[in-house]
Image (spheres, grey):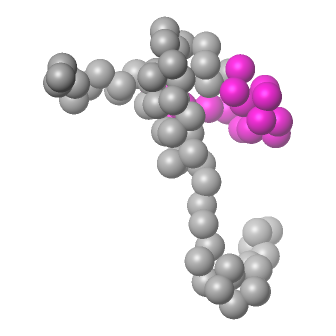
Amino acid sequence: MKALKPDKYALLDKYARETPDKYAHDKVVLAKYLQKPAKNDVEKARLIFTWIATHIQYDDEAFNTGKEKDEKR
């Protein structure tokens, strides 16, 4: 098994983290944007993983209590 270099995905991770908000309104648009720099399926998966990990927030308290926080505050 080939070892991965620590910086192998640094540029892809940066690209995914810095995705402009205008692409997040539609999952198809977002997917097309995220796959642009990918050279293979593993890189596509990494871009999607990084975007999810840095853009999706879970509110465990709201889920467990049924009380949603006001996002406008």
The residue sitting at 79% across, 28% down in the picture is 28
The residue sitting at 61% across, 13% down in the picture is 36
The residue sitting at 22% across, 29% down in the picture is 6
Q: Is residue 22 visible?
A: no
Q: Report the magenta residues as a range.
A: 14-32
Viewed as shown, does residue 4 lie left or right of 38? left
Is residue 19 inside the magenta stretch? yes
Is residue 9 inside the magenta stretch? no
Q: Position of residue 50 (x, y in %)?
A: 49, 39
Q: Is residue 4 visible?
A: yes
Q: Would you say the magenta stretch is mainly helix, strand or loop?
A: helix
Q: Residue furthest top?
A: 39
Q: Position of residue 68 (x, y in %)?
A: 76, 80
Picture quarter containing residue 22?
A: top right
Picture quarter containing residue 32?
A: top right
Q: Position of residue 19 (x, y in %)?
A: 62, 32
Location of the C terminus (image quadrant)? bottom right
The residue sitting at 40% across, 22% down in the picture is 11
Identify whether 69 is placed above or below 16.
below
Identify whether 58 is placed above or below 13.
below
Viewed as shown, does residue 10 lie left or right of 12? left
Identify whether 32 is placed above or below 21.
above
